[in-house]
Image: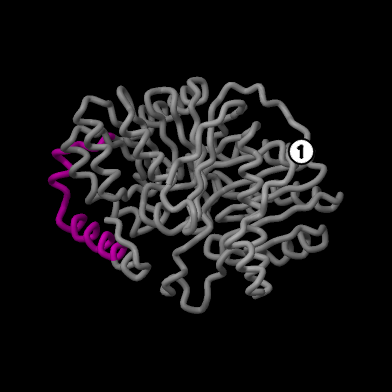
Amino acid sequence: MRLPPLEPGHTLQLLEGSARLFPALIEAFDQARHEIWLETYIFDFNGSSAQVAAALERAAARGVAVRIVVDGFGTPETPDDWHQRFRKAGVHWQVYAPVGSLGVLWPGSWRRLHRKLCVVDRTVAFCGGINVMDDLHDPNHGALDFPRLDFAVRIGGPMVQDIWQAASILWQRLRALHRLDPRAIGQVLLHPMPRPPAPPPGDRSGAARAALLLRDNLRNRAHIERAYLRAIGRAQNEIIIANAYFVPGGRLRRALAGAARRGVRVTLLLQGKYEYFMQYYASRPVYDALLKAGVSIHEYSPSFLHAKVGVFDGHLATVGSSNLDPLSLLLAREANVMVDDEAFAGALRERLLLAITHHGEEMDPVRYARRPLRERLLERLALGVMRLALIVQGKKYL
């Protein structure tokens, strides 16, 4: 299974948080003339998220084909007023894998749509880890005192077509499943939509080489993990990774430890603020081998760390939706962008170093080794629950 090649000709803009992403989305939506495709795990309607929703409503009302896919667990319901507004304007809305009566106990319920993709008129696209959710609001925790740390990329160039194709294929598959038409389902599963003729070419003068990395349960089961493994294995000087839910499997742990032992500076910025029991505690047992190998681990706690990014040797970078845990790498639909460009990687590196320096608490290996028995028991319980969930899914990872 070969990784997609990094193609030249991209213009890329790093966007930090909803404070930067949402204005860029709204500008693109207000300029849209033909179509908007949007995929997100969470579509919230509080704070600045409502401005994004209003821009989609305006676009649909003036005749733009607006198609939105949300995840059935991340977005279990839409407020009645917005449901009516979208319907009146002509916004098309589909739900990926609605959660049934058994909720997360149902074996298939952990296979979620977690990717965050958007493409407008097949000329500009967005990819990253940011949901349609205000930086200072959390559906489970309410108002936040400090903005969530996350990133996205505004994309121009050849990759826009790849994102359009990914979004359109998923839309057609969901429509076929909704109609319960076996012939239509078989057609879209076995014979993906051919790429149509490209629209009039836009600016392809960008210097950045980049590729879209998808993870699904069909043709792209391991692209994102393999891209990380390749980048870690080829790094010679420095690796910086910020990841919200960090429970890497054996291959990733060995790759990171091996890089540190051969003299590469490996720095991890990980979640330090309690959000979910399993993800918070299941990550800590894997720190031991990394700390012993010389990996520097910093925990971010001013707000929720939601980033899924990395920089390798100052020129290679990745930004996307995929955590380094089994839910992302084995079960969910994810999308990352891999970029080889010193300017883009340098901007991301600078932002991560600022977060590490000013908001990251470095983990002391001695203190880690002496953590209380209660913490160790909670860690083992969380890891055991995660392993059991994977067994139910028929997966082996940890």
Q: How many C-alpha atoms fall within 10 Å of the one at disc 1: few (<14), some, or many (≥20)?
A: few
Q: Report the amino acid beneath label 1.
A: Pro
Using residue 234 as the reference point, say whether residue 14 is left or right of it: right
- Front residue of 390 and 181: 181
Image-quadrant location for residue 362: top left
Magenta run includes residue 381? yes
Q: Residue at x 34, y 59 (%)?
A: 277
Q: Which quadrant holds residue 106? A: bottom left
Question: Would you say the magenta stretch is mainly helix, strand or loop?
Answer: helix
User: Is residue 164 positioned above or below 193 on the image?
Assistant: above
Using the image, determine if residue 320 lies above or below residue 398.
Answer: above
Q: Is residue 98 above or below residue 8?
A: below
Percent of width and height locating residue 273: 37, 47
Residue 261: x and y, percent? 19, 30
Count of number-bearing discs: 1
Q: What residue sits 32% from the left and 40% below the top?
A: 299
Single out the residue that lies furthest toward the bottom: 101
- The image position of residue 216, as x and y in percent, is 49, 55
Residue 52 in view of the camera: yes
Q: Quadrant of the C terminus?
A: bottom left
Residue 169 placement (x, y as % from top left): 63, 55
Residue closer to the observer: 345 or 58: 345
Q: Is residue 261 magenta?
A: no
Front residue (pair 272, 254): 254
Residue 304 visible from this viewpoint: no
Q: Residue at x 82, y 42 (%)?
A: 33
Residue drawn at 68 percent across, 47 percent down: 195
The residue carrying mark 1 is 199
Residue segment shown in magenta? 362-387
Q: Is residue 275 left or right of residue 85?
A: left
Label 1 element class: loop
